[in-house]
Structures are given as structure tokens and as C-alpha cells.
Image (cartoon, helix red, strand yellow):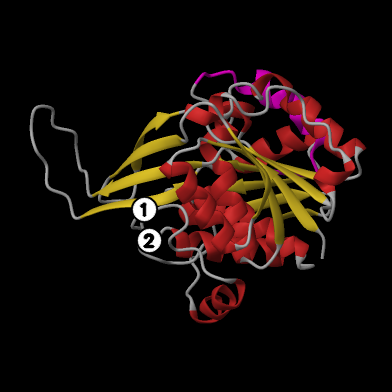
């Protein structure tokens, strides 16, 4: 089994629930306030490691208690931090307000993320040693990387790595300007339905998948939340229904899904098996507060899958 080189932001989430509404100049009592590892790079690499695959994380934290917390949590999961550097700014942080139905509002301090990846990555031998796949976790969340995400993925391909991208949400609205140059350099694209709508201009997941494949992405995985996922590739399309579970908090579920999918393929799984495993990891994630609290080891996830109930067909 090879390994995954993952690039993305790393941050601390401070989560509180339930928050049905915001009331200014008032005090609201809540049931939970928790701290957790977050960030697209942090959560994805954590999920890969917990699923028993090798992963090396590239990114930045500050030299502060939040950064120390992120590093301890990632190391405890088995993530290789040899390429996780230090920034001058403080570690990135998000305050996450969670509604009773699991929906969220995020207040984000970019912090160290503002300094990460100022130039296209050059995949030197020491950087990729032991890795066969490169994953870029949300280029929209890394201000300096936005302009060269496509070049970075092209360089990864030229270095002999297979590639994947999880798009994330673009708060700046530069969707295709940033992501468009990436598609031709992708073996695997992860995108949720809202992101697909903004990028491809359609609510239909099949049409969105065709849009991305026409632009070069070899395999497209459209994450559909409670409806599971749709996978489109050279061999056709298939649907993988979600598991029927209660929702506590959806923070990090998409990153957990992507990490679990990549880990499954590193273990030799085909696309259908990887999609099922990723759906299970996502279902476990949304039953706990935070992006990593519900992520289980591979054997425990597989055991949970055997007794879990699936939802009906998606589309």
C-alpha cells in the first residue's frame, strides 16, 4: 500500500450547540461547547490515518497552544507531520454554531492559512517518498494557493502521483477561475451538490458530473449528504445510498468522507466499495460534535457497517 500526500489548511474548531438563532445583546444557554481538530487538510488526513492508510500532511500552524493541540491530535492518529510547518500568524480557528438539525454557521479566522503555499508545489523526491497519491483539500480555503492550484496538480501528475481534489466552498465567488484549471489534472474529484451547482451551473448531479468529466476529471464523486453519493467514471455511473443515522453536527463530514474514500482505495478497494466505506465514515462523523470525534478506526467502521441500515435509492 502506498501513501497519500495531503495539502490543506489545519485549524481548531470551537463548536457549540444547539444554536437555533442568534440573539444580540442577550445570553443563550447551550448544551455543548467543545474543541476539535478542523480544517480541510487536518480533517481529511486524520480520516485517512484512522482508516489505516499512510498519510503525510502539508500545511501550516502557528506556534501557539492551538497549533500544539492540532499537532498532538494528528500525531495521535498516525499522521506524518514532517511537512507541517510553522507560520508567523496564529493557528487558524473557526467558531462553529450548530443548529438543532445539524446545520452550521462558521466564523473563521484564516490565521496561518494566509501564509500557506505561496508558490506552486514542486514534488521533490523527499517530499513524495512513500506516497503514490496527492490530495488537495479545498484550494478556496488557502488564499495564496488559489492562483496556482491547477499548476500544483499538474506538477503532482508529472511527478508520477495520482491526484484528487475536494473543492470546498468559495466565499470569494471565484469558482471556475480557481477550480477550472484543476480538472484536467485530476484522477478523482470530490464535490458536494452545492459546490457542483456553483461550478457547473446545474442542480442535477449527473449533469454536473458530466460537466467535470468533459473538462478532464477522470472520476467524479458528487457528495449528496443524506442521500449518499453519486460516482461517475470511465466505466459508467453508480449510486451509493447513505446510512440512516441521526444528525448531531455535520462539521467536517465532507472531509471525513473524502479521506475515507482515499484510504479505502489505498487498501485496494474499487470505487463502489470505497464509496460505501466513505458513506459509513461520514455517517459516523455526523453523530458526534466536531470534524474528527466520530471518526473510527477501519476495523470498527467495517464492523459498524455490517449492522447499519441504508437509506433508499437517491435519484
The structure residue drawn at horizontal position 79% and vertical position 43%, both measured from the top left corner, is 163
Instruction: Residue 160: name its quadrant.
Output: top right
Please report the bounds of the magenta region as a residue range: 172-189
Label drawn at residue 35: none
Q: Nearer the viewer, residue 142 or 287?
A: 142
Label drawn at residue 249: 1
Q: How far from the left and from the top, in percent, is residue 204?
A: 59, 39
Q: Is residue 152 magenta?
A: no
Q: Quadrant of the N terminus?
A: bottom right
The structure residue drawn at horizontal position 43% and vertical position 43%, both measured from the top left corner, is 66
Q: Nearer the viewer, residue 75 or 205?
A: 75
Dot placed on the residue nearer the N-terminal end, 1 or 2: 1
In the picture shown, does residue 47 fall above or below 215? Answer: below
The kind of secondary structure the magenta stretch mainly shows is helix
Q: Is 32 left or right of 302, judged from the image as shown?
A: left
**Residues at marks 1 and 2, CA–CA distance in whole angstroms:** 6 Å
Amino acid at each position: 500500500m502506498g501513501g497519500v500526500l495531503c495539502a490543506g489548511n489545519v485549524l481548531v474548531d470551537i463548536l457549540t450547540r444547539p444554536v437555533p438563532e442568534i440573539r444580540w445583546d442577550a445570553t443563550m444557554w447551550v448544551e455543548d461547547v467543545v474543541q476539535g481538530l478542523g480544517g480541510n487538510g487536518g480533517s481529511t488526513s486524520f480520516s485517512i490515518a484512522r482508516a489505516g492508510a499512510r498519510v503525510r500532511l502539508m500545511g501550516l500552524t502557528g506556534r501557539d497552544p492551538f497549533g500544539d493541540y492540532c499537532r498532538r491530535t494528528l500525531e495521535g492518529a498516525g499522521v506524518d507531520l514532517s511537512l507541517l510547518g510553522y507560520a508567523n500568524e496564529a493557528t487558524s480557528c473557526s467558531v462553529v454554531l450548530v443548529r438543532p438539525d445539524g446545520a452550521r454557521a462558521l466564523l473563521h479566522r484564516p490565521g496561518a492559512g494566509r501564509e500557506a503555499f505561496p508558490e506552486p508545489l514542486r514534488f521533490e523526491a523527499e517530499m513524495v517518498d512513500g506516497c503514490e497519491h496527492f490530495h488537495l483539500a479545498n484550494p478556496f480555503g488557502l488564499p495564496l494557493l488559489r492562483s496556482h492550484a491547477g499548476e500544483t496538480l499538474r506538477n503532482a501528475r508529472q511527478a508520477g502521483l495520482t491526484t484528487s481534489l475536494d473543492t470546498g466552498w468559495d466565499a470569494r465567488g471565484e469558482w471556475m477561475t480557481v477550480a477550472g484549471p484543476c480538472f484536467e489534472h485530476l484522477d478523482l474529484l470530490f464535490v458536494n451538490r452545492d459546490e457542483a451547482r456553483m461550478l457547473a451551473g446545474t442542480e442535477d448531479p449527473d449533469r454536473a458530473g458530466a460537466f467535470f468529466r468533459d473538462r478532464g476529471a477522470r472520476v467524479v464523486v458528487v457528495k449528496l449528504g443524506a442521500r449518499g453519493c453519486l460516482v461517475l467514471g470511465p466505466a459508467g455511473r453508480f449510486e451509493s445510498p447513505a446510512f440512516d443515522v441521526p444528525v448531531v453536527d455535520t462539521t467536517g463530514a465532507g472531509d471525513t468522507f473524502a479521506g475515507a474514500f482515499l484510504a479505502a482505495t489505498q487498501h485496494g478497494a474499487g470505487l463502489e466499495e470505497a464509496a460505501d466505506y466513505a458513506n459509513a465514515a461520514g455517517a459516523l462523523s455526523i453523530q458526534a460534535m466536531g470534524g474528527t470525534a466520530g471518526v473510527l478506526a477501519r476495523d470498527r467502521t467495517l464492523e459498524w457497517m455490517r449492522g447499519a441500515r441504508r437509506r433508499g435509492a437517491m435519484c
